[in-house]
Image: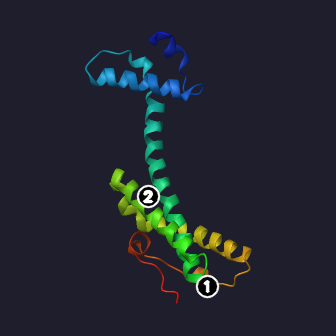
Amino acid sequence: MQSNDSVGHMSNYDVDVYAWSMRQSELLRRLAAGERVNDADLDWPNIAEEIETVGRSERSAVASRVATILEHLCKLQASPAVEPRIGWQATVTRARGDVERLLRESPSIRPLISEIIVQELPAATRVAAIELSRYREEPRLSLDALTYTESQVLGDWFPDCA
């Protein structure tokens, strides 16, 4: 087993991020407990970058689920097909649950949902168009004209396509 000193010397951020993160978290916990640590061992620039990365990752996870919801809502609204609808609805329901779990863990992302919808909708409509084209389906309406509100995306709403 290696001593903490040898781990500290080999835990360069650019070489082994896992070892680096374990060492930095150990140092931060010791510092928080009031113990003196060598400030030179704390890699403040990369610690700050990693903390920012966590936030971006959470937002990205929400955006990914919202994109999935949008894609499937577009297909539900535009596709003339009957058979895949249940699967699309199930995907929307699962993704909505995922978004709600992520928002419970990071509630500060909730005010960004409308912005995320606007950002993700163009790509979602492109994917929906490609998927419909792949199955030689002619959309019943223009995918580019579709818009969705936050309550439609995250609520229980499904398009009425009868």
The answer to whether residue 127 is above or below residue 7 is below
Q: Mark 2 — residue? A: 98
Q: Mark 1: which secondary structure?
A: loop
Mark whose residue sits in front, 2 or 1 = 2
- Identified by mark 1, the residue type is Ser
**Which label belongs to residue 150?**
none
Percent x, y of residue 34: 25, 20
Q: How many marks?
A: 2
Percent x, y of residue 31: 31, 22
Q: Mark 2: which secondary structure?
A: helix
Percent x, y of residue 75: 59, 77
Query: Crowding at label 1, few (<14), some or many (≥20) Cα neighbours within 10 Å?
Result: few
Percent x, y of residue 18: 52, 28
The answer to whether residue 47 is above or below residue 78 is above
* Between 149 and 40, the one nearer to me in the picture: 149
* Between 98 and 60, the one nearer to me in the picture: 98
- Identified by mark 2, the residue type is Asp
Query: Crowding at label 2, few (<14), some or many (≥20) Cα neighbours within 10 Å?
Result: some
Q: On the picture, is 34 further left or further right than 6?
A: left
Q: Residue furthest left?
A: 34
- Point 55% across, 82% down: residue: 77
Q: Of callouts 2 and 1, which one flags the residue occurring earlier in the amino acid sequence?
A: 2
* Between 134 and 106, the one nearer to me in the picture: 134
Q: Quadrant of residue 140?
A: bottom right
